[in-house]
Amino acid sequence: MKIIWTAILLLGLSVACSQPGLDVEAIQAEIQNIILRQQTAWNAHDIEGFMADYWKSENMTFQSGNNRLKGWETLLTRYKTNYAGEKMGKLTFSDIEIYVLNKNIVYALGCWKVEQEESVNDGVYTIILKRFPGGWKIIHDHSS
């Protein structure tokens, strides 16, 4: 599996580097801002704010463990059911790596940690973002 990710990364970097006028650093900064905005919203116990950067579509996908969800509304319901109010705890994203595949597709890797009153949960995530006319949106999220 590591070989496949390495190949995808190298292909993405070669495609991104070969596109004239592609400002990789500016795109990476935009994505970094989205991730930080999500962290801020979560820590303010604002689930809708956290979800604002997800693609509001039935085609948006989320995977965690052995579960796959489809649709923005489905994911919103999951978060409201499992993390409402004080159950949200404090979210921290770290070790963020952002890879620009082209001017309209990016993926980011990182670690997440949620510190709740009596527990700490953590894991890794991969998000895929697509640029739409209204800006970047997360079209796929895989967390474990």
Image: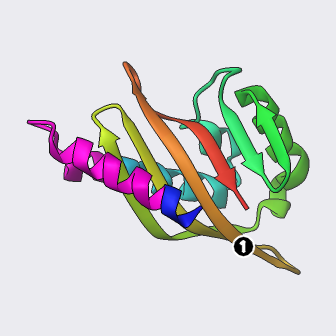
Q: Quadrant of residue 51?
A: top right
Vertical position of residue 47 compared to residue 57: above or below:
below
Residue 23 is a magenta residue:
yes
In front here: 135 or 89? 135
In the image, is 79 to the left or to the right of 47? right
Residue 3 is a magenta residue:
no
Where in the figure is residue 100, as x and y percent of width and height? Answer: 32, 47
Where in the figure is residue 105, as x and y percent of width and height? Answer: 39, 36
Residue range in magenta is: 5-30
Q: Is residue 114 visible to the viewer in this orientation of the structure?
A: no
Q: Which residue is mark 1?
A: 122
Where in the figure is residue 116, as x and y percent of width and height? Answer: 80, 73
Residue kind at label 1, given as amino acid type: Asp
Q: Main secondary structure of the magenta part?
A: helix
Q: Residue at x 63, y 46 (%)?
A: 141
In front here: 26 or 142? 142
Vertical position of residue 103 compared to residue 107: above or below:
above
In the image, is 103 to the left or to the right of 79? left
Vertical position of residue 124 compared to residue 80: above or below:
below
Farthest residue in the left direction?
20
- The quadrant of the picture occupied by the C terminus is bottom right
Q: Quadrant of residue 101?
A: top left
Q: Of helix, strand and loop, which one carries label 1?
A: strand
